[in-house]
Image (cartoon, rainbow, N blue to C red):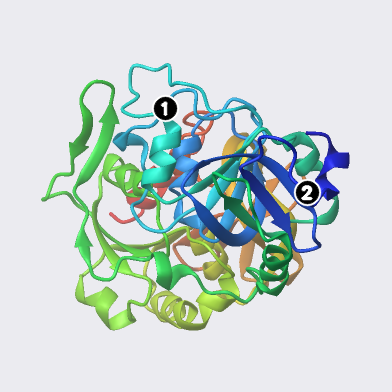
């Protein structure tokens, strides 16, 4: 569909799905997956692979993902590529119709998988035009809807999109976090064998605080030599210390870091006061920065996808990274005792910090997503190595 068709409130022939933006813009297509409607923020992801991992990443909670790569669903779906079983992306918008899967690892087709997980899809959309719109105007609020008869109350959907408050100021970590502690048992994946088992007697011991984590983070900590215990987002410093950690990991997650930080940052500050080694990724990185005295800001369009170049400032090495964030640490607010370690080569935004006098550091990108494919695994080895 051409961009000029975006304003049409009447559906074209064969349309069974629609994305209605808060300004009344209607983007029509063929619905797939679950029936119904969902409201959230529309973003875009530029990765060519990993659509199932994207759809199950809790960092995408309350978001509708536009995939810029046209062929989504072509390798089907399987249980091994699920990153989390909690709430994640609401749905997705794709260019081409979903075809039958062609991959030896496929256990079911993507349409059936989306339906089973309650996620709404919209196919046949000019995703280039939608991506350009997001780049120019920012990530809009919208409702994605799927009905087999193609009948929609556009006025009501527009009103729902316009009344949704947006992600700024919204704490979502509690929605997607574990509710109780868990001893992590998963190990590294190998083709034909699946996931291994984590050794129960491994040292050192990492306590991970789950703000909406991806499972592969914990597998990488295990691969680097650690034993991992996962605690809920609301864990107190007393609960953390009761696990006798050698270090604390702060996970990724959705929503506004300043909102989640209202209960998480005081815990992180107390851990810093105890000189606890800390490693944060994405949301965890942002809250570590807030705990050190910096602030965060909502980005115009965010960074989501693969092949994001990040410069490591200590030696000038460029890492090819995977990213998923709509908020960022404000470089200009970093206090004197916080050193910027990494920056995005796309826009110069902050991608890493370390705190002087503390064994505490964080990165904005996702080293567990195996970009490069192994450019950033050293971060897990660095963290586990400093725990002695």
- The answer to whether one can see residue 292 in this image is no
Crowd class of label 2 (few under 14; some 14 to 19; many from 20; radius 10 Å): few
User: How many marks overall?
Assistant: 2
Q: State whether residue 128 is above or below residue 258.
A: above
> Where's residue 291, x and y in %?
54, 76
> Horizontally, is 261 left or right of 311 in the view?
left
Question: Residue 240, located in which quarter of the rendered image?
Answer: bottom left
Toward the viewer: 126 or 238? 126
The Cα–Cα distance between marks 2 and 1, rounded to whole angstroms, is 32 Å
Quarter of the rendering occupied by the N terminus: top right
> Which residue: 76% across, 67% down?
332
Toward the viewer: 142 or 89? 142
> Horizontally, is 51 left or right of 1 in the view?
left
Question: Residue 127, located in which quarter of the rendered image?
Answer: top right
Which label's residue is closer to the chain start, 2 or 1? 2
Residue holding disc 1: 76
Mark whose residue sits in front, 2 or 1: 2
Q: Dot 1: what SS?
A: loop
Toward the viewer: 31 or 278? 31
Quarter of the rendering occupied by the C terminus: bottom left
> Where's residue 72, x and y in %?
55, 29
Crowd class of label 1 (few under 14; some 14 to 19; many from 20; radius 10 Å): many
- The answer to whether one can see residue 121 in this image is yes
Residue holding disc 2: 10
Toward the viewer: 384 or 95? 95
> Horizontally, is 323 left or right of 330 in the view?
left
> Which residue: 14% across, 44% down?
199
> Where's residue 178, x and y in %?
31, 65
Q: State whether residue 4 is above or below residue 292.
A: above
Q: Residue furthest right?
A: 4
> Which residue: 34% across, 16% down?
104
> Horizontally, is 381 left or right of 89 in the view?
left
């Amino acid at each position: 569909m051409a961009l000029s068709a975006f304003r049409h409130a009447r559906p074209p022939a064969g349309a069974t799905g629609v994305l209605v933006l808060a300004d009344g813009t209607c983007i029509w297509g063929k619905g797939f997956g679950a029936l119904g409607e969902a409201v959230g923020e529309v973003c875009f992801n530029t990765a060519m692979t990993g659509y199932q991992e994207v759809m199950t990443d809790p960092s995408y909670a309350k978001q509708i993902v536009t995939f810029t790569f046209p062929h989504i669903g072509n390798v089907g779906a399987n249980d091994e590529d699920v990153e989390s079983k909690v709430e994640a992306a609401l749905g997705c918008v794709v260019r081409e119709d979903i075809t039958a899967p062609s991959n030896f690892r496929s256990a079911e087709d993507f349409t059936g998988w989306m339906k089973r997980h309650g996620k709404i899809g919209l196919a046949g959309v000019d995703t280039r035009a939608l991506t350009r719109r997001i780049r120019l105007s920012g990530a809009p609020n919208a409702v994605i809807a799927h009905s087999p008869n193609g009948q929609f109350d556009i006025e009501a959907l527009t009103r729902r999109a316009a009344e949704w408050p947006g992600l700024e100021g919204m704490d979502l970590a509690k929605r997607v976090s574990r509710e109780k502690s868990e001893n992590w048992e998963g190990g590294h994946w190998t083709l034909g064998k699946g996931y291994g088992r984590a050794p129960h007697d491994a040292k050192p011991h990492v306590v991970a605080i789950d703000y909406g984590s991806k499972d592969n983070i914990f597998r990488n900590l295990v691969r680097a030599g650690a034993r991992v215990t996962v605690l809920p987002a609301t864990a107190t410093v007393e609960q953390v210390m009761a696990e006798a950690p050698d270090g604390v990991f702060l996970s990724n997650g959705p929503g506004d870091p300043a909102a989640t930080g209202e209960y998480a940052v005081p815990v992180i500050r107390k851990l810093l006061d105890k000189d606890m080694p800390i490693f944060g990724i994405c949301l965890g990185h942002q809250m570590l920065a807030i705990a050190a005295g910096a602030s965060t800001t909502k980005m115009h369009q965010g960074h989501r996808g693969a092949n994001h170049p990040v410069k490591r400032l200590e030696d000038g090495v460029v890492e090819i990274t995977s990213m998923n964030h709509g908020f960022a640490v404000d470089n200009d607010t970093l206090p004197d005792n916080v050193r910027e370690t990494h920056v995005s080569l796309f826009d110069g935004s902050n991608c890493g910090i370390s705190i002087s006098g503390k064994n505490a550091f964080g990165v904005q990108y996702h080293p567990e997503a195996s970009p490069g494919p192994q450019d950033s695994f050293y971060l897990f080895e660095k963290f586990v190595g400093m725990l002695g």
